[in-house]
Image (cartoon, grey):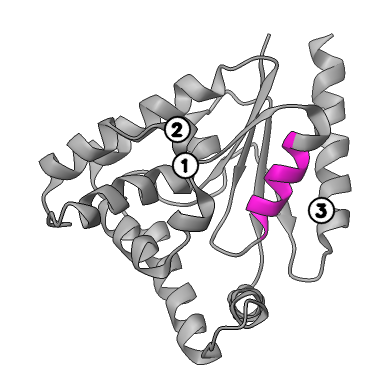
C-alpha cells in the first residue's frame, strides 16, 4: 500500500528542501506541485497566449507532463508570476489536481509538496505537514538565495512580493492555502532544516509502523 506524505506551506518556508530530503530518505517519489502550475504557465508564455483565458489555461494544464518538470527552467521569476495568476482558476486547478492525485498513488510511497495537498489533493495522506516561517525570514532566505547565485536583489521588493503571494494564496476562493485540520505544524523561522527533517521523520516513522 502506498504511503502518501502531504507537505504544505507558503513560499520559501523550506517545504521543498524538506520534501526532497524526505523522499530521498525513504526512497519515495517526489512531486513539487508548484512546478505543475509553472509548467502550464510557461506553455502559455511560450505560445504567446493570454494569462486570463481560463479555457486556454486549462488546455495547457491538461497537457503538462509530470515527468518533464525542469526546476532550473521553471524557477524563473516571470514564470512564477504567471503561475500565480492561473493558479486561481478552478479549471486549471481541477486539471492539475487530477494529475497530482494520480502521481500520489505511485508505489512504494510519495511526497507531494504545495499549498493544498493536505486539504484538497491528498486529504487522506498518512502524514500531513504544514511548514511555515515568518514573512521576514522567508524574504531573507529568498534574498540570500538570489545573492548567492551572483545576482542583484532588493530585500524590500522581495519582502513585498512574499506578502503579496501569501495574500493571493490564502485569499483565493478555490483551494486557499491553509493547514489541514490534522496537519502537524513545523515553524522553521528559527529551526534548521536538519531539525525540521528529524521532526518530520519521527512522524513518518510512526505512520510506517501503523501500516505494518
Instruction: Identify the residue shown where x is 86% and y is 28%.
Output: 205
Q: Badge 2, how many Cα within 10 Å: few under 14, some, many 20+?
A: some
Return the x and y of residue 113 as percentages of the image width and height: 58, 43
Q: Quadrant of residue 195?
A: bottom right
Q: Is residue 54 left or right of residue 9?
A: left
Residue nearest the observer in this picture, 19 or 131: 19
Return the x and y of residue 165 as percentages of the image width and height: 42, 67
**Numbered mark located on residue 69 in the image:** 1
Residue nearest the observer in this picture, 12 or 134: 12
Frontmost of labels 2 and 3 is 2
In the figure, 158 relative to 87: above or below? below
Secondary element at image label 3: helix
Decide if residue 120 is in sight here.
no
Q: Earlier in the sequence, mark 2 or mark 3?
A: 2
Return the x and y of residue 138 as percentages of the image width and height: 62, 72
Q: Is the residue under label 2 in contact with that under label 1 (CB below 8 Å)?
A: yes
Instruction: Identify the residue shown where x is 70% and y is 50%.
Output: 185
In the figure, 212 relative to 149: above or below? above
Which span is picked out in magenta? 14-23
Between the residue at mark 1 and the residue at mark 2, the CA separation in whole angstroms equals 6 Å
**Numbered mark located on residue 66 in the image:** 2
Q: Badge 1, how many Cα within 10 Å: few under 14, some, many 20+?
A: some
Between the residue at mark 3 and the residue at mark 1, the CA separation in whole angstroms equals 26 Å
Between the residue at mark 2 and the residue at mark 3, the CA separation in whole angstroms equals 27 Å
Q: Is the residue under label 3 in contact with that under label 2 (CB below 8 Å)?
A: no
Secondary element at image label 2: helix
Amino acid at each position: 500500500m502506498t504511503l502518501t506524505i502531504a507537505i504544505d506551506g507558503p513560499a520559501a518556508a523550506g517545504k521543498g528542501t524538506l520534501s526532497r530530503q524526505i523522499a530521498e530518505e525513504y526512497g519515495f517519489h517526489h512531486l513539487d506541485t508548484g512546478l505543475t502550475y509553472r509548467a502550464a504557465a510557461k506553455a502559455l508564455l511560450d505560445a504567446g497566449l493570454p494569462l486570463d483565458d481560463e479555457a486556454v489555461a486549462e488546455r495547457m494544464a491538461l497537457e503538462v507532463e509530470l515527468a518533464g518538470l525542469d526546476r532550473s527552467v521553471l524557477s524563473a521569476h516571470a514564470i512564477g508570476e504567471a503561475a500565480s495568476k492561473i493558479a486561481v482558476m478552478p479549471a486549471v486547478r481541477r486539471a492539475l489536481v487530477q494529475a497530482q492525485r494520480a502521481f500520489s498513488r505511485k508505489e512504494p510511497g510519495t511526497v507531494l509538496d504545495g499549498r493544498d495537498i493536505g486539504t484538497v489533493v491528498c486529504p487522506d495522506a498518512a502524514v500531513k505537514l504544514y511548514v511555515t516561517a515568518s514573512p521576514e525570514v522567508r524574504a531573507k532566505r529568498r534574498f540570500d538565495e538570489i545573492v548567492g547565485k551572483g545576482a542583484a536583489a532588493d530585500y524590500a521588493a522581495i519582502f513585498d512580493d512574499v506578502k503579496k503571494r501569501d495574500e493571493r494564496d490564502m485569499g483565493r476562493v478555490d483551494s486557499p492555502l491553509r493547514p489541514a485540520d490534522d496537519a502537524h505544524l513545523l515553524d522553521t523561522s528559527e529551526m534548521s532544516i536538519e531539525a525540521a527533517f528529524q521532526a518530520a521523520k519521527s512522524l513518518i516513522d510512526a505512520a510506517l509502523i501503523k501500516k505494518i
